[in-house]
Image (cartoon, rainbow, N blue to C red):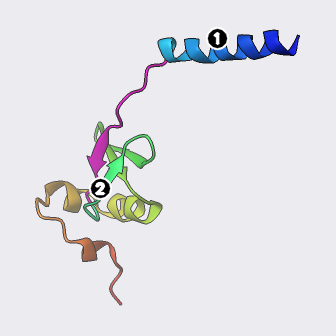
Amino acid sequence: MKALLFVLVIVLTSCTFLFYPNKSPEFATDLVCGMKVNKSDAYVLKYNGSKYYFDNYNCKATFKMNPEKFITNKCVNPTDSIAKK
């Protein structure tokens, strides 16, 4: 009985690869800090019909305060995301 169960688990596990092929991860650039982020692991924000991806919550929050600053800025300065006192 245990051998049959073991074979059944192996067969079902093998079949899942047929239905769910491995995909290569998709990457995006965090507009606030300039880091490359995996889209499936990133913090996401929709703005004006577009999705923006961030490596952490602070970058997402910084972007949310002034999105146009980061969308129109072609050269991203990582220190822009640090609050200046």
Please tell me which residue is depicted at 37% across the width and 42% down the height of the picture.
Answer: 39
Q: Is residue 75 above or below residue 84?
A: above
Please tell me which residue is depicted at 39% across the width and 47% down the height of the picture.
Answer: 45
**Of residues 21 and 47, the one drawn nearer to the viewer in this rendering:** 21
Q: Nearer the viewer, mark 1 or mark 2?
A: 1
Q: Is residue 74 left or right of residue 39?
A: left
**Mark number, residue 76:** none
What are the residue bounds of the magenta stretch?
A: 20-31
Disc 2, SS: loop
For this orientation, the residue located farthest to the bottom is 85
Residue 41 is covered by the magenta coloring: no
Q: Is residue 18 above or below residue 22?
A: above
Report crowding for label 1: few under 14, some 14 to 19, many 20 or more residues within 10 A (C-alpha). Answer: few
Residue 13 lies, in percent from the top left, at 62, 18
Nearer-N-terminus badge (1/2): 1
Q: Quadrant of residue 21?
A: top left
**Mark number, residue 11:** 1
Residue 50 lies, in percent from the top left, at 28, 39
Q: Quadrant of the C terminus?
A: bottom left
Residue 30 lies, in percent from the top left, at 29, 55
Residue 27 is covered by the magenta coloring: yes
**Of residues 32 and 9, the one drawn nearer to the viewer in this rendering:** 9
**Of residues 8 and 59, the one drawn nearer to the viewer in this rendering:** 8
Amino acid type, mark 1: Val
**Mark number, residue 30:** 2
For this orientation, the residue located farthest to the front is 3
Q: Is residue 67 left or right of residue 74?
A: right
Q: Quadrant of the N terminus?
A: top right
